[in-house]
Image: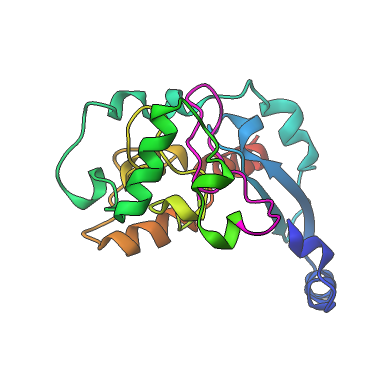
Amino acid sequence: PGIIHDKSGSFKEFKNHLKTQGYYFDEIVLNAEKLGVSQERRRYFIFASKTPVSSLNQINEFYSTNSRPISWAISDLVENVGDDIFNTASEHSLENKRRIEYLFENNLFELPNSERPDCHRLKPHSYKSVYGRMYWDRPAPTITRGFGSTGQGRFVHSLLKRTITPHEAARIQFFPDFFNFGDLRRRQYQDVIGNAVPSKLSYLLALHQLR
């Protein structure tokens, strides 16, 4: 959504170019959580066509639904795991394993400053969710390419002492299980899945125009 406030003027120039080329367009920021995705994720869309387009603002009106917790997306994967990269979590350092243990031993979802590295502990910070544990009964935070690391967000599994697997991250991103990512390395899975936009959003954009 930050592109809306582009200070360089290039985004405004882009929209002016669409007009000069005879395109109709509309734009909107969609919140995945409000459209059936079990994740807090806001993304900007612009839809352009040579024929008039339906108002995108109606998407929120027509398709909004109740929030879905991450348990809706990944509860069946708690015990149904494989031993391949796609279905296993990243390995963590001994220190980060200790931090994960601390969260579970004390039934916490935020890691206190006393257990954080010096770069957090010794100065004021706003990274409360970093090193945190996900809430089973709430939507997930925004999935990023760092979902395999405890130090890059709230990516510790709600029930298990590990970060989420690529399969779990893909589910939260609304990838269907039949989607074939190919045979990737762990970092590649994280890049592809974390940088994606939930397919539910593009589906609703297209469905709305078809209707």
Q: Which residues are magenta?
A: 122-143
Q: Is residue 142 visible?
A: no
Task: Give the x, y percent position of residue 100.
Answer: 38, 40
Magenta stretch, main secondary structure class: loop
Task: Give the x, y percent position of residue 199.
Answer: 50, 44
Q: The C terminus lies in which quarter of the figure?
A: top right
Q: Is residue 127 left or right of residue 177?
A: right
- Residue in view at x 79 percent, y 39 percent: 57
Task: Give the x, y percent position of residue 40.
Answer: 61, 39
The answer to whether 35 is drawn above or below residue 13 in the figure is above
Question: Residue 87: within the magenta?
Answer: no
- Residue in view at x 55 percent, y 41 percent: 203
The residue closer to the viewer here, 149 or 107, is 107
Question: Residue 131: within the magenta?
Answer: yes
The answer to whether 135 is drawn above or below residue 152 in the figure is above
Quarter-of-image position of residue 66: top right
Q: Is residue 140 left or right of residue 63?
A: left
Task: Give the x, y percent position of residue 92.
Answer: 31, 53
The residue closer to the viewer here, 157 or 202, is 157
